[in-house]
Amino acid sequence: MRGPVRWVLWDVKDTLLKVRRSVGEQYCSEAERAGLKLPAAQLETAFRQAYRQQSRLFPNYGRAQGMNSQVWWTGLVRDTFAQCAVDDLALLDRLANNLYHNFCGPENWEVFPDSNSTLKFCTALGLKQGVVSNFDKRLEGILRGCGLLTHFSFLLTSEEAGVAKPDPAIFTQALVRCGVPASSVVHVGDHYVNDYLTSRSLGIRGYLLDRQVCQGHLDVPPQHRLHSLDELPARLKQDAD
């Protein structure tokens, strides 16, 4: 028999908040400030290609190769613009540095309308909350700037943990911080494998957030699926009964 829920763990990107504009649009704006005219669509394509390559060569911000996230992102941005025929090394460095810091605060992030109210409700229920996210060290500043940081007892990023979802080891680290059995922990995220399957494989009560109502992954029962975070409080109350 399962015990009562004590903790709620959260994914962040595309669960609690999202980028305000597409990467291509934001890179295009930074390029314009530097006097460059590059189409947003071209930058978006270049970014996606550079991101795939960087993630393959140096997974999880290159932790295993002795890198940190700023070095990792700097290389990614340089590669993105280099694909668009920008070859001035000093300019590439300036673009990379500016874009890295542009994403440090809340300006380029948008909180979903249902995030704050749901986090407050969980606190009102007496639940502790934490974050388990494939993210870098900028996350604390972003959540502080977005007004969400005070809801959480801890943040565990993949950069800090040294492992990234879907490696279950990041959830194992989170459970140690929670100090309760996995069956007393809920996890909410938007990724079928990273969030739902991996958390459930450890006995955590995983919920899959499906904001677009895609209705994919038919193995996810309706009671494990959320179309809005507003639905979570009722599920938590049911779990408590």
Image: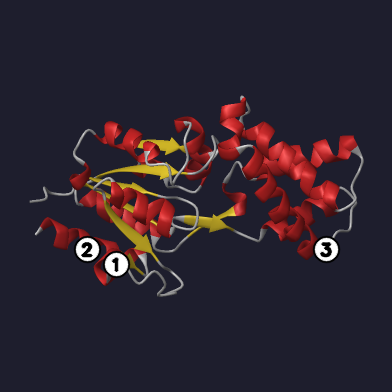
Residue 132 against residue 228 in the figure, above or below: above
Where is residue 178? Give x, y as percent: 26, 36
Q: Residue at x 81, y 36 (%)?
A: 93
Residue that carries the numbered disc 1 in the rendered image: 231
> In what element is the residue under mark 3?
loop
- Real-space Cα separation, disc 2 to disc 3, in angstroms: 45 Å
Q: Which mark is residue 173?
A: none
Q: Say whether residue 23 is left or right of residue 78.
A: left
Rendered image quadrant of residue 156? top left
- Real-space Cα separation, disc 2 to disc 1, in angstroms: 7 Å
Q: Which mark is residue 235?
A: 2
Please, what is the three-letter code of the amino acid marked with disc 2? Arg
Residue 47 against residue 169 in the figure, above or below: below
Where is residue 239? Give x, y as percent: 15, 58
> Callout 1: few (<14), some (14-19), or many (20+) C-alpha neighbours within 10 Å?
some
Q: Say whether residue 66 is left or right of residue 90.
A: left
Task: Between residue 28 and residue 85, name the one nearer to us.
Answer: 85
Residue that carries the numbered disc 3 in the rendered image: 39
Q: Say whether residue 202 is left or right of residue 158.
A: left
> In what element is the residue under mark 2?
helix
Instruction: Mark 2 and mark 1 in contact? Answer it, CB < 8 Å.
Output: yes
